[in-house]
Image (cartoon, grey):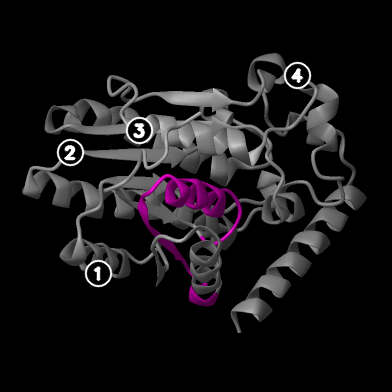
Amino acid sequence: MFSEQLLAGRHILVTGGGTGLGKSMATRFLQLGAEVHICGRRKGVCDETATELMDLHGGHVTSHGVDIRNQLAVDEMIGNIFKEAPLTDLINNAAGNFISRTEELSPRGFDAIANIVMHGTFYVTHAVGRRWIAAGLRGNVVSITTTWVRNGSPYVVPSAMSKSAIHAMTMSLAAEWGHYGIRLNTIAPGEIPTEGMSKRIKPGDEAGARTIAVNPMGRVGTMEELQNLAVFLISGGCNWINGETIAMDGGQGLATGGNFYQLRDWKDTDWASARDSIKAQNDKDRAARG
């Protein structure tokens, strides 16, 4: 679909770029000639991904270990990147989510999501955007949201609130920063099965099964489709797209709401099983971080 070296000369940061959707987008940017930065809390994972991508595709991938909930750490990372070469594009992909009945949600659980998704996304966008403005540079920001920003979602209230904040930030800064040549848009993907999502959002389900059963197109999304849309939004193919949230879900949000309303049928035992599964995955992740 895209010409070779379409993104040559571009310097792109992908947050949460060590795994899942972020890794997939970083891969495609690299294949199309961009120099790529990836960051995540687990520096070792990002290092492994950077090495893997360069071994497979050549080019240059720089790995950063940073917790985007820490504003000072974010600003230091962005400052160091800009000293070498200013970013041209930012992909806000880092996120977190888990299902829970809201009456059982702790403040700590709420903050765990809001601090990554809402605060962290703003910290990175602000650190990059103000440097673009100070240097008189144009730029693109693409953030990953959800279709729930349009209609909310039960059982994932911290994520629904935080993703809605990114949606509002995108519209607001598109209007505020557009005259600087800075564009902001978001992609709201439907289900593209990844291990992290499946373990915390649909524990016990076969990946993609529920989506396939209700989606108007009868399938889940693919990484390639996300890659293509992300590339298009930063490619210059239509630089008048600004402040938009583009759903990529086969029409599921329109047909069903695209959220977690179906979990109203769960019993206490189902919720207990889900909590155990989520806890086991969190313990596994903590062990991996050492």
Classify mark 1: helix, strand or loop.
Answer: helix
Residue holding disc 4: 217
Classify mark 2: helix, strand or loop.
Answer: loop
Residue 33: say if magenta.
yes
Q: Nearer the viewer, mark 4 or mark 1?
A: 4
Picture coordinates of residue 140 (x, y %)?
Answer: 29, 38
The CA span between labels 2 and 3 is: 13 Å
Going from the N terminus, do you reach mark 1 or mark 3 first?
1
Q: Which mark is residue 235?
A: 3
Going from the N terminus, do you reach mark 4 or mark 2 first?
2
Q: What residue is at 43 percent from the left and 36 percent from the top?
A: 231
Label tally: 4
Q: Say if mark 4 contacts mark 3, CB within 8 Å.
A: no
Q: In terms of image quadrants, where is residue 64?
A: bottom left
Classify mark 4: helix, strand or loop.
Answer: loop
Residue 93 visible in the displayed image: no
Residue holding disc 1: 76
Q: Which residues are magenta?
A: 18-44
Mark 3 burial class by Cα count in 10 Å: few <14, some 14-19, many 20+: some
Q: Nearer the viewer, mark 1 or mark 2?
A: 2
Mark 4 burial class by Cα count in 10 Å: few <14, some 14-19, many 20+: some
Amino acid tagged 1: Glu
The CA span between labels 4 and 2 is: 37 Å
Amino acid tagged 3: Ser
Going from the N terminus, do you reach mark 1 or mark 2 first?
1
The CA span between labels 4 and 1 is: 44 Å
Residue 217: say if magenta.
no
Residue 52 visible in the displayed image: yes
Amino acid tagged 4: Met
